[in-house]
Amino acid sequence: MLESRTNEKRKDTRISCDVKAWYTSKDNFGQEYIKNISLGGTFVETMEIFSMGQEISLSIPFTDNNKYVKVKGKVVRIEKEGIGVNFLWG
């Protein structure tokens, strides 16, 4: 189930989700769940250790046909449940 939410601090509308995505970074790689996503970024549920400002690449499933959207981002928030990632466009 997808749920759309807005927040005064956010530029883009977030959509709640529960999608398994692949990630790679300088030190790690694996699969984790994306809990919400917007045009500007995403929240990745993870127990892995990341640093503020660390770059991460995500491969997010686009359809049921094994197609993925690949995006690069930067860790901008670290919480007990996971990390907030801003997408780096262009």
Image (cartoon, rainbow, N blue to C red):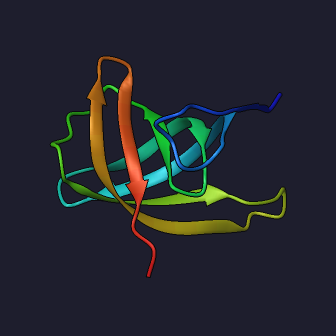
Total numbered labels placed on residues in the image: 0
Q: Is residue 78 above or below residue 87?
A: above
* Apparent side of residue 74 relative to residue 46 in the rendered image (left or right): left
Quadrant for residue 73, please give it: bottom left
Q: Is residue 80 above or below residue 90?
A: above
Residue beneath the point at 65% across and 66% down: 68
Residue beneath the point at 30% across and 17% down: 80
Q: Is residue 41 above or below residue 79?
A: below
| Quadrant into which the C terminus falls | bottom left
Quadrant for residue 66, please give it: bottom right
Q: Position of residue 72 (x, y in %)?
A: 40, 66
Q: Position of residue 69 (x, y in %)?
A: 62, 67
| Quadrant into which the N terminus falls | top right
- In the displayed image of the protein, which residue is found farthest to the bottom? 90
* Apparent side of residue 8 relative to residue 30 in the rendered image (left or right): right
* Apparent side of residue 48 relative to residue 19 in the rendered image (left or right): left
Residue beneath the point at 65% across and 43% down: 13
Q: Position of residue 77 (x, y in %)?
A: 29, 36
Residue beneath the point at 57% across and 31% down: 7
- In the displayed image of the protein, which residue is found farthest to the front? 8
* Apparent side of residue 70 relative to residue 47 in the rendered image (left or right): right
Which residue occupies the foreground of this view, 2 or 46? Answer: 2
- In the displayed image of the protein, which residue is found farthest to the top? 80
